[in-house]
Image (tube, rainbow, N blue to C red):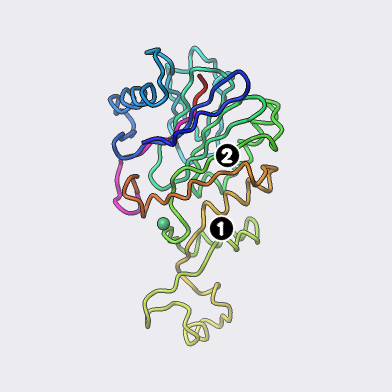
Amino acid sequence: MFINYAVGTQNENIIFGFGDKNIDFQTKNTKARFDLLKQIRLNYHIQAQNCFNIAELNQVHGNTVISVEEQGANKFSEKIIDADGIFTSMKHYLLCIKTADCVPLLFYDKILGTIGAVHCGWRGLYNDILLNSVNMLKSYYNANIENVAVVICPGICKNCYTVKKDLYEKFINKVPTYKNYYRTKHTAAGNDDCTPSYRHKLHKLNADDCSSEYLFDLKGLIKYVLLASGFRKENIHDMNLCTCENENYFSYRKNKTASRFVSFIGKL
Ligand SMILES: [Zn+2]
């Protein structure tokens, strides 16, 4: 059910992990929130009934990152804010991200104890949610990014994420080297957009320029951006789980489902 990590600095414990299809964390499923907390108490042998307040967001595929402290911790639980990333250094807040193919990222500052959870699909990545997360860690929480660990929770993999040409172009127009995270998708024989004759017809010599479909390595590009932002390679932990291929997780691409599984991090 959960990745069984309870890591900590000298004086505090961090728990983090992700659920599966047994807990459908889609909005308004209050039983799922109750079940999650119950599972966490069992899993980590926590006696206290009220060990965590669930801190979740109304995820909008945007680039807004918030801090529990900045929002006002007491008021925070009364409203659900439109945002896609959340950070705190406070105990007893369980930061939750719900996904079905987009990539959930969990952050943990090993020195200062700040934690974060971010929802990163192509829109968030394109609009610099990772940059905003780094800025939040640095400017609000005084983090040295070299000390921050990241867990890449289950999300769609580079062999399953088919996208159209316009998305490929959008990304390479932003940063040309992002091209390295796209591969042309070769369809069945005879129906290949990149056959030499088709390329000739389009007066395009480069196969990349005429393909209509691409495979996008979203997690690969996330890692590239994290490394470029100062994260150390050994602090980036990819669970290597694909939501499209692994039946334990919800996949929007595969099933057009409204269901979501949860990824979480909290301090005890
Ligand atoms: Zn896959």
Q: Is residue 113 left or right of residue 73?
A: right
Disc 1 is placed on an element classified as: helix
In the rendered image, which residue does mark 1 sit on? 170
Q: Marks 2 and 1: CB-CB under 8 Å?
A: no
Q: Quadrant of ligand 1?
A: bottom left
Q: Is residue 1 left or right of residue 71?
A: left
Region rendered in magenta = 252-265
Hey, which quadrant is residue 235 in on the image? top right
Disc 2 is placed on an element classified as: strand
Percent position of residue 226, x then y: 63, 45
- The label nearer to you, 2 versus 1, is 2
Identity, as a three-letter code, of the amino acid under mark 1: Lys
Q: Is 263 a magenta residue?
A: yes
Percent position of residue 13, x then y: 54, 22
Percent position of residue 21, x then y: 30, 40
Image quarter hosting the N terminus: top left
Percent position of residue 195, x then y: 47, 83
Q: Nearer the viewer, residue 36 or 258?
A: 36
Above-or-below relation of 106 to 195: above
In the rendered image, which residue does mark 2 sit on? 150
Mark 2 vs 1, N-terminal side: 2
